[in-house]
Image (spheres, rainbow, N blue to C red):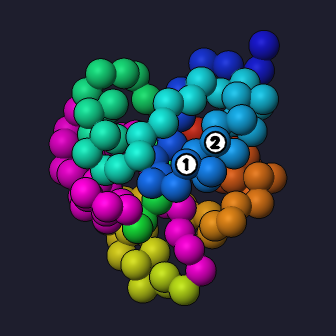
Amino acid sequence: MTESDSNSILVVDDIEENCDLLELKLKRNGYQVSIANNGQEALDTLAEKHIDLLLLDITMPVMDGVDVLKRIKQDEKYSKIPIIMLTAAGEPKTVLKCLRLGAMGYVTKPSDMDEVLKTIANCLQES
């Protein structure tokens, strides 16, 4: 049994292929995975399930990742959950804003899975 066996990750991305790839790779590495396709679904999932970490896309319809991050960090119930932002190349100002708002890190899409797994492990270890 690895450390990741008990960790539940919520992947929030509006692109189904990104969710499918992350879900497959994370499950293969022992993580429990939930999927949300937009920010509101992410907040709804947090209210329903125990989540240890979020992989949160910045650019999404309904509610973008920055707004989701703000809401989570302002809610005492969820504010300690580590959040890793998923970002497309070319969004450095937004990434900096997310880090200032409390995100623990970021990975650039398309994601290098080794980088994603390392970043997740580091964030879970720190939290």
Residue in the foreground of this view, choosing between 18 and 121: 18
Residue 20: mark: 2
At a point 41% along the width and 46% down the height, the residue shown is 37
Which of the numbered marks, if any, corresponds to residue 16? 1
Relative to 75, residue 101 above or below:
below
Verify whether residue 82 appears in magenta. yes
For this view, does 37 lie left or right of residue 101?
right
Region in magenta: 60-89
Q: Is residue 112 left or right of residue 60?
A: right
| Label 1–label 2 contact, CB within 8 A | yes
Residue type at mark 2: give it: Asp
Q: Element type at marker 1?
A: helix
Q: Which residue is at the far top? A: 1
Residue 7 location, x and y as percent? Answer: 58, 26
Q: Say what secondary structure mark 2 lies in.
A: helix
Residue 55 within the segment the image draws in magenta: no
Q: Residue 8 carries which label?
A: none
Quadrant of residue 76 in the image?
top left
Instruction: Please state the horizontal and vertical placement of residue 125, each as a whole percent of the image.
Output: 61, 39
Tell me the crowding category of disc 1: few under 14, some 14 to 19, or many 20 or more residues within 10 angstroms, Cα based.
few
Is residue 37 depicted above or below 69 in this figure? above
Q: Can see residue 48?
A: yes
